[in-house]
């Protein structure tokens, strides 16, 4: 057997030919799918060094013309996608890796396997760009059901790959699928965000969002009897391999053990694409995936990657929840990834043009608009803003290098070739869009402009560097609108209102605009803490984390939880634990290297957008910043309650060897602030808790002398 090969099939479908679903909806052209494919290609070429790389790319750029640019043999049409999948299944051999990345529309269509899925069953599908191209020019552009790449058909290709086994070595093919698409997303308010699913359709019974194509597969377009049967058998085999307890929010494919599937969202959500912070338009999932890959070392599991992706996306798009199915503990791609250095470097300085060239580009998630900090040669702690020589923003990003323009305060002559450069990764400044509505009663419509103008003025005086009015054409973090009841309403970038952001604020209230600034800053603080991730630290492996259900009969009056025994381990499904209301749970933290003490704190983020310190216990917070773990495990108890049918709580477990005052992260810090944090993480927390933010971003707080890490647990409590 020769050297292993890493096979990649990258599909980016932006241009869609005219099409109409059975309910009048259509798959409109997109703008970020080709960018996704190009960025993934650059990352694979940079990171895959331990295997031969074979990339097949099918892309359809949307240039506003009647047809995509490029060779039509390389467009993601139904025939080309099927050909590429079949060739991949034939070409890959045991010991190889297969990676399929699809960015484009997802579809829902009446099933072609009614004997297996039922008369009203639905097939989930990839949507090729020629889904509506008629047989003859004079025919209407109705969707062609035979062109959908359905879930049952995909199962056949997966089955062919899974059945290739080297009998001597027992090696198999490692398969990874990433689908940055959705089936049933809702309407988005505003024009800078698009959902990758059908839109404009009429809602009907069983199809509340109008995305279901009920056109039946015609006999002449159906798979041959033998193929039809083999597809159903393959799908059934995958379903039989799914864990019994698997209850996931996505129905693309059964969560079998033969592959990893990263899907952009749950079935009831939208997979979004947008342009963030000036970067090229692209899928929210793909952007978060590439950011996570750029930050990890060479040996991480998909579970670790998913945790980071979830934190990054939920920090800004809480209504999109990426789903991870299959072999969660498998290492990313099944191969050793070539490491990406912590810092980049300046390779050229143009004094006249005030630009610097960097030795990293799209493969390292550097894109147009990325902000970087430039330091002095020899610097190793990049969390101190006053040690920074300059800040620059990337204006041109290539595969392996980029060009950045210095800000007005920088002195180009102070920058040396070889100087370390760090991506300014954790955003503290949030952009707010003030959107007038056209559906308000006349009396409210007459006062709407004044109400929104008051918020704009309040941002300028009370935003304190944490809030900005979003420039036109960019994607905001938040939208502020006036509701039909005369209240201010804060929405996510899709236009979905944030629930439980109480109390409601009337546009007529004295200091109502000021109250909105307080709410926006509260949301920003919450989402910044939610986004805090640092998976590269060895501390994450040093502290073993276990979540347990307390023994029957145990409650808060039963004394302290036993430190090392007792409790029933809880199982996570779809990245989340589930418990019934009023259940007591134990969080057990064990230091696997007792000769190296670690300081820990647990921060809770609840449904009302509050942040609280859970460990140390609130009663100890006056004099205690953290708990120290050495030779004895720490077990901490929490009672989970659900005043509504279902709640979601997020637990952030912070670990550090330094002295950090985690109390400052709480929504209302119950302690006196020190002037400066004494280490990297402390300075980052200081920046979050500051009264005023004077820079655009703060760098991830890394420091060789005081490493830190964070783990995230999500607990869903139901009545």
Image: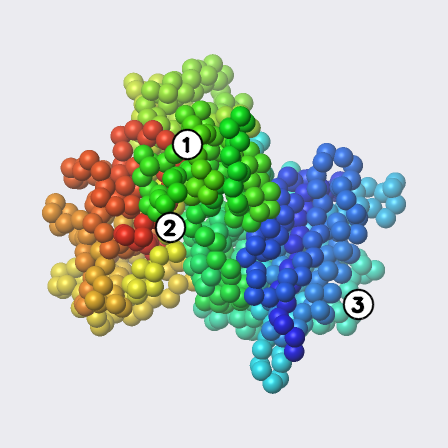
Q: Residue, x 20% and y 49% (percent of image)?
A: 659
444 or 72, which lies in front? 72
**SS under mark 2:** loop
Q: In which quadrant of the rendered view does residue 275 lie?
A: top right
- Which circle, 1 or 2, is nearer the viewer? 1
- Which circle, 3 or 2, is nearer the viewer? 2
Mark 1 neighbour density, 10 Å: few (under 14) some (14–19) many (20 or more):
few
The quadrant of the image that shows the C terminus is bottom left
Colour mapping used in the image: rainbow
**Above or below, 684 relative to 395:** below
**SS under mark 1:** helix
* Residue that label 3 marks: 224
**Above or below, 81 relative to 345:** below
| Rendered location of residue 203, percent (x, y) | 61, 42
* Residue that label 1 marks: 414
* Residue that label 2 marks: 533
| Rendered location of residue 504, percent (x, y) | 34, 30
Q: Considering only order in the chain, which callout, 2 or 1, is on the residue closer to the N terminus?
A: 1
């Amino acid at each position: 057997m020769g050297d292993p090969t890493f096979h990649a099939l990258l599909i980016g479908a932006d241009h869609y030919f005219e099409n109409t679903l059975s309910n009048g909806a259509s798959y409109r052209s997109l703008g970020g799918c080709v960018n996704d494919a190009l960025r993934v290609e650059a990352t694979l070429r940079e990171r895959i060094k331990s295997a031969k790389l074979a990339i097949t790319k099918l892309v359809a750029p949307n240039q506003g013309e009647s047809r995509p640019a490029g060779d039509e043999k390389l467009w993601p049409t139904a025939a080309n996608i099927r050909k590429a999948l079949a060739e991949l299944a034939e070409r890959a051999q045991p010991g190889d890796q297969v990676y399929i990345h699809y960015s484009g529309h997802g579809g829902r269509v009446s099933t072609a396997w009614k004997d297996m899925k039922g008369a009203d069953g639905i097939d989930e599908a990839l949507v090729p760009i020629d889904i509506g191209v008629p047989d003859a020019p004079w025919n209407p552009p109705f969707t062609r059901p035979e062109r959908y790449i359905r879930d049952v058909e995909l199962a056949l290709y997966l089955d062919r790959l899974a059945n290739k086994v080297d009998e001597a070595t027992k090696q198999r093919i490692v398969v990874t699928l990433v689908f940055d698409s959705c089936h049933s997303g809702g309407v988005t308010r505003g024009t800078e965000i698009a959902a990758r699913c059908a839109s404009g359709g009429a809602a009907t019974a069983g199809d509340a969002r109008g995305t279901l194509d009920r056109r039946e597969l015609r006999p002449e377009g159906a798979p041959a009897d033998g193929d039809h049967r083999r597809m159903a058998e393959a799908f059934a085999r995958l379903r039989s391999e799914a864990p019994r307890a698997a209850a996931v929010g996505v129905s693309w494919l059964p969560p079998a053990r033969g592959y990893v599937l990263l899907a952009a969202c749950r079935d009831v959500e939208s997979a979004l694409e947008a342009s963030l912070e000036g970067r090229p338009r692209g899928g929210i999932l793909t952007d978060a995936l590439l950011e996570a890959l750029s930050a990890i070392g060479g040996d991480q599991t998909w579970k670790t990657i998913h945790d980071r992706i979830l934190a990054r996306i939920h920090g800004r798009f809480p209504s999109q929840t990426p789903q991870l199915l299959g072999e969660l503990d498998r290492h990313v791609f099944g191969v050793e990834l070539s490491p990406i250095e912590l810092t980049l470097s300046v390779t050229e300085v143009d004094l006249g043009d005030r630009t610097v060239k960097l030795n990293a580009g799209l493969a390292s998630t550097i894109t147009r608009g990325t902000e970087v900090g430039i330091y002095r040669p020899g610097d190793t702690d990049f969390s101190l803003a006053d040690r920074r020589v300059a800040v620059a923003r990337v204006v041109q990003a290539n595969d392996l290098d980029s060009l950045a323009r210095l800000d007005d305060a920088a002195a180009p002559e102070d920058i040396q070739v070889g100087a370390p450069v760090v991506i300014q990764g954790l955003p503290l400044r949030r952009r707010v869009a003030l959107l007038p509505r056209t559906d308000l009663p006349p009396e409210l419509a007459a006062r709407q402009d004044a109400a929104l103008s008051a918020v704009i003025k309040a941002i300028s005086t009370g935003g304190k560097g944490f809030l900005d009015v979003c420039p036109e054409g960019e994607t905001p973090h938040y939208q502020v609108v006036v509701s039909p009841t005369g209240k201010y309403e804060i929405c996510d970038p899709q236009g979905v209102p944030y629930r439980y952001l109480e109390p409601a604020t009337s546009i007529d209230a004295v200091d109502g605009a000021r109250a909105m600034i307080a709410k926006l800053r509260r949301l920003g603080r919450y989402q910044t803490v939610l986004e805090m991730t640092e998976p590269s630290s060895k501390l994450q492996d040093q502290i073993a984390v276990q979540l347990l259900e307390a023994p029957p009969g145990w409650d808060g009056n039963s004394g302290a939880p036993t430190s090392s025994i007792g409790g029933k381990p809880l199982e996570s499904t779809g990245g989340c634990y589930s418990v019934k209301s009023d259940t007591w749970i134990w969080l057990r933290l064990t230091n696997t290297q007792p000769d190296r003490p670690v300081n820990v704190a647990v921060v809770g983020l609840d449904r009302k957008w509050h942040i609280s310190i859970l460990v140390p216990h609130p009663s100890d917070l006056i004099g205690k910043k953290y708990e120290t773990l050495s030779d004895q495990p720490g077990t901490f108890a929490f009672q989970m309650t659900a005043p509504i049918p279902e709640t979601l709580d997020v637990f952030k477990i912070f670990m550090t060897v330094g002295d950090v005052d985690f109390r400052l992260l709480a929504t209302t810090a119950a302690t006196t602030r020190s002037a400066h944090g004494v280490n990297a993480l402390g300075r980052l927390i200081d920046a979050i808790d500051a009264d005023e933010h004077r820079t655009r971003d703060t760098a991830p707080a890394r420091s060789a002398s005081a490493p830190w890490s964070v783990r995230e647990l999500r607990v869903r409590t139901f009545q």
